[in-house]
Image (tube, rainbow, N blue to C red):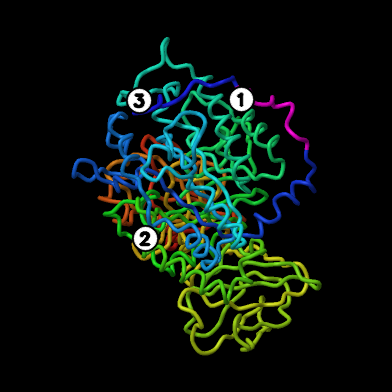
């Protein structure tokens, strides 16, 4: 195997203490973050020796994502490291990769310098578990960095804190059968190697972004994260660092866990878009095009170009960035399905990029037909209205907008849009057909700073309230609206602290009784959560029920769960969790409150 897997450190490299972190004013931070906030779209690349396995080991498919095959397959490290001998990316064309990123409209790129298996795409001085083990024996990062510079794409690096093969990393995997150090693993020795490698990649490749991961195991502490971030900023004060360098992340949502010191510059929701964004916080959704990050030959479950464009729009409309992943093959080729989708996105951005780059979160919590981004203008704001569902009646209602729309047009054409200001809020009257199958964009010039009033849901002619998930407000971190005919619900309700509510018009009559009906779904793996539907304070204004197994997350059933008294003046209906013994609460599609017939007003 040549040199030892990890050569002894010449010296223990200590990180700068937290107190030595560079002080930064709010204005200085804004200046440092400006390009990243304006970029909105980046390309993520997961590439390493796991691409050789392509999701299979000894002729069998290993479940899970490609880059986790060593862990998921419990592959002995002594056998796993032989993948490097077959990692010969002779078709790797860094110039083509960078050109594709630019063509796709990506303003920056982040590539895995090393993943959890510890393999490095450069010649690290901290051992030889790197490109020197491969047939081509060449640095894979430098030519890509240079190509990105030529294309005007900012270059960023991913670095895994976790390392399944390092002799001093703990917890040590049972299948890590490489020689253990004399006297046993010493985690602080591992930490010093992390600092040394991070210094190598910062000095060698001058990344604009450093994207950490693998920080969740208990051996890595908040103090470790603070020290590593401080070290990085000492090396390059202008660098942008994600929050996974520390311990504040709570699950895949990438949000801050209460009681933990947050470090880094931006949050990292993974495979999801926060329902209302993260107001006041810089954040970036990272997402796969199919089901895996690293290349898996059998994974052909590709998201459509329309889905990817609309996800980019959704993210931008909530004030975030979108980091979209590709997993190249061991030969160095980006799968054609990924190339096709990136080019589709680039074609859309070539016409509609004005509505994404440099914009901010739109003023609307929701629009029935699409999303909205905005940018400030001398006399107010420019609203970019992304129409996903073209209206059959040609009316785009700007529900709740209290401002005047001065003029409107279809982006990418000279077609003007008629403005109807006779109602409580503006209506744009579009004609013809959508100009783009992914999203047509209407540009509307708004007079003054946009103000959107809260819209309260009204009862129907019978006095009943039909409250749908698509109209709900979600309070919390995990739960969010899932669109689509098989979902159309509040899903991912894994945090018992989350709640769902609807602002409503208080019933005209005084206190009266209503029956409560709920439509929901629950998988057989996690029934039993107790929830409450309430319209006010007091036991009579609240009803509890227990979630039953409905046969699956997409198998929705309707159930009547009891009767409540609606207090005079109450204007909110809330569903909250009482207790949650399983992994999730339910998929909630709707709540319906029906007045009890001939019920006298309750005094």
Nearest-to-viewer mark from 1 and 2: 2
Q: Which residue is mark 3?
A: 173
Q: Position of residue 376 (x, y in %)?
A: 74, 67
How far is disc 1 from disc 2 in space, using C-alphas? 40 Å
- In reply to whether residue 20 is colored magenta, the answer given is yes
Which range is magenta? 13-23
How far is disc 3 from disc 2 in space, using C-alphas? 32 Å
Residue 223's label in the rendered image is: 1
Nearest-to-viewer mark from 3 and 2: 2
Q: Residue at x 65, y 48 (%)?
A: 281
Identify which residue, 376 or 137, lies in the foreground: 137
Determine the secondary structure under disc 3. Answer: loop
How far is disc 3 from disc 1 in space, using C-alphas? 24 Å
Identify which residue, 21 or 381, lies in the foreground: 21
Q: Is residue 67 left or right of residue 425?
A: left
Q: Earlier in the sequence, mark 3 or mark 1?
A: 3
Q: Which residue is mark 2?
A: 335
Asked if one can make out residue 573 in the rendered structure from this viewpoint, the answer is no
Q: Earlier in the sequence, mark 1 or mark 2?
A: 1
Q: Is residue 541 left or right of residue 531?
A: right
């Amino acid at each position: 195997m040549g040199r030892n897997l990890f050569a002894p450190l010449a010296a223990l490299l200590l990180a700068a203490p937290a107190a030595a972190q560079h002080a930064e004013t709010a204005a200085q931070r804004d200046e440092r973050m400006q390009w990243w906030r304006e970029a909105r779209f980046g390309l993520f690349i997961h590439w390493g020796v796991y691409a050789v396995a392509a999701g299979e080991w000894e002729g069998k498919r290993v479940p899970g994502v490609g880059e986790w095959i060593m862990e998921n397959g419990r592959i002995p490290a002594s056998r796993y490291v032989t993948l490097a001998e077959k990692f010969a990316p002779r078709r790797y064309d860094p110039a083509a990769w960078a050109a594709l990123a630019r063509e796709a409209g990506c303003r920056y790129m982040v590539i895995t310098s090393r993943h959890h298996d510890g393999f490095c795409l450069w010649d690290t001085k901290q051992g030889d578990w790197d490109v020197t083990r491969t047939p081509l024996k060449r640095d894979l990062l430098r030519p890509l960095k240079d190509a990105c510079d030529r294309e005007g794409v900012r270059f960023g690096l991913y670095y895994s804190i976790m390392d399944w093969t390092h002799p001093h990393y703990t917890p040590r995997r049972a299948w890590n059968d490489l020689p253990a150090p004399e006297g046993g693993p010493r985690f602080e020795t591992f930490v010093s190697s992390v600092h040394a490698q991070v210094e190598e990649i910062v000095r060698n490749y001058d990344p604009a972004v450093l994207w950490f991961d693998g920080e969740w195991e208990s051996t890595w502490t908040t103090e470790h994260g603070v020290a590593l971030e401080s070290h990085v900023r000492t090396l390059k004060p202008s660098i942008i660092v994600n929050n996974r360098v520390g311990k504040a992340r709570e699950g895949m949502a990438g949000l801050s866990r209460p009681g933990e010191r947050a470090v880094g510059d931006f949050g990292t929701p993974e495979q999801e878009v926060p329902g209302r964004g993260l107001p006041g916080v810089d954040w970036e959704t990272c997402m796969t095009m199919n089901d895996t990050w690293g290349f898996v030959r059998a994974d052909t479950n590709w998201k459509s170009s329309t889905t990817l464009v609309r996800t980019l729009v959704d993210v931008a409309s909530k004030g975030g960035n979108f980091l979209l992943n590709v997993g190249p093959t061991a030969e160095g080729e980006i799968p054609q399905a990924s190339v096709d989708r990136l080019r589709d996105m680039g074609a859309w951005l070539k016409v509609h990029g004005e509505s994404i780059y440099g914009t901010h979160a739109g003023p609307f919590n929701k629009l029935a037909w699409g999303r909205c981004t905005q940018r400030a203008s001398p006399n107010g704001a420019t609203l970019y209205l992304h129409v996903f569902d073209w209206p059959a009646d040609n009316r785009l209602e700007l529900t709740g907008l209290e401002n005047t729309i001065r003029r409107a047009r279809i982006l990418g054409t000279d077609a003007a849009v008629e403005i109807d200001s006779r109602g409580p809020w503006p209506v744009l009257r579009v004609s013809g057909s959508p100009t783009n199958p992914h999203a047509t964009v209407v540009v509307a010039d708004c007079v003054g700073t946009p103000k959107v009033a809260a819209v309260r849901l009204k009862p129907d002619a019978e006095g009943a309230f039909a409250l749908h998930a698509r109209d709900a407000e979600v309070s919390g971190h995990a739960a969010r609206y899932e669109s689509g005919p098989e979902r159309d619900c509040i899903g991912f309700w894994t945090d018992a602290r989350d709640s769902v509510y609807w602002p409503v018009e208080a019933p005209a009559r005084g206190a009266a009784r209503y029956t409560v009906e709920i439509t929901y779904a629950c998988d057989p793996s996690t029934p039993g959560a107790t929830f409450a539907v309430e319209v006010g304070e007091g036991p009579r204004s609240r009803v509890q029920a227990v979630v039953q197994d409905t046969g699956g997350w997409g198998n929705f059933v309707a159930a009547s769960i009891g009767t409540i008294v609606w207090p005079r003046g109450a204007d909110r209906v809330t569903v909250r969790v009482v207790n949650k013994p399983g992994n999730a609460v339910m998929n909630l599609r709707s709540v319906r409150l029906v007045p009890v017939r001939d019920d006298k007003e309750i005094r």
